[in-house]
Every structure is written in structure tokens, then in C-alpha cells.
Amino acid sequence: MVAHRRKIELTRDEAAAALAGGKVAGAWLDALGRTDLRQLSRVEWAEFCERLTRGYLEDLQSQADAQVPF
């Protein structure tokens, strides 16, 4: 039996960062010439995940930097 968990709601900033991460990872897939994630090798999958995560984190950092008053 699968326990159902409540959906985690993203903040506006997190949602924007998720889209930014998706764009970074998607651009890499485009450059690779792939559209089907199931066809990625383990190494390619790890690279995709890293680019997605890095794009997300970099966008969050950029948003935070823009909000710092000093």
C-alpha cells in the first residue's frame, strides 16, 4: 500500500527556479539530441539531474541576490 502524502506547494520563487532548472536541463537534452529520458544512459541521467538541480539552485541564488538590500 502506498501512503499518500500531501503535495508540497512551491513558493513563487521556487516555481520560477524549477522552470529555470528545467530550461537548463532541457537545453542540454536538445544539444544531446534526445527527447526520451528513458533512452539516457546512467551517466547521461546523472548529468541531466545535475544540470536540472544546478539550474534550480543558481536561479534561487540569483533571486536571493536581487533581494539583498546591500
Image: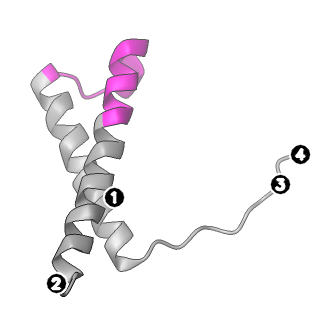
Of circles 4 and 1, which is in front?
1
Q: Residue at x 33, y 18 (%)?
A: 44
Q: Residues within 10 Å of mark 1 (few under 14, many from 20)?
A: many
Residue 68 placement: quadrant: bottom left
Q: Tell me the distance, in whole angstroms, between the alpha carbons under discs 3 and 2.
A: 45 Å
Q: Are marks 3 and 2 in contact (CB under 8 Å)?
A: no
Q: Are marks 3 and 4 in contact (CB under 8 Å)?
A: yes
Q: Are marks 1 and 2 in contact (CB under 8 Å)?
A: no
Give me the disc on residue 70: 2
Amino acid tagged 4? Met
Q: Tell me the distance, in whole angstroms, between the alpha carbons under discs 3 and 4.
A: 6 Å
Instruction: Give the mark nearer the N terminus: 4 vs 2.
Output: 4
Amino acid tagged 3? Ala
Q: Residue at x 27, y 58 (%)?
A: 19
Instruction: Give the mark nearer the N terminus: 4 vs 1.
Output: 4
Q: Tell me the distance, in whole angstroms, between the alpha carbons under discs 4 and 2.
A: 51 Å
Q: Is residue 43 magenta?
A: yes
Amino acid tagged 1? Ala
Residue indicated by mark 3: 3
Q: Position of residue 8 (x, y in %)?
A: 58, 68
Residue indicated by mark 4: 1
Q: Residue at x 38, y 34 (%)?
A: 49
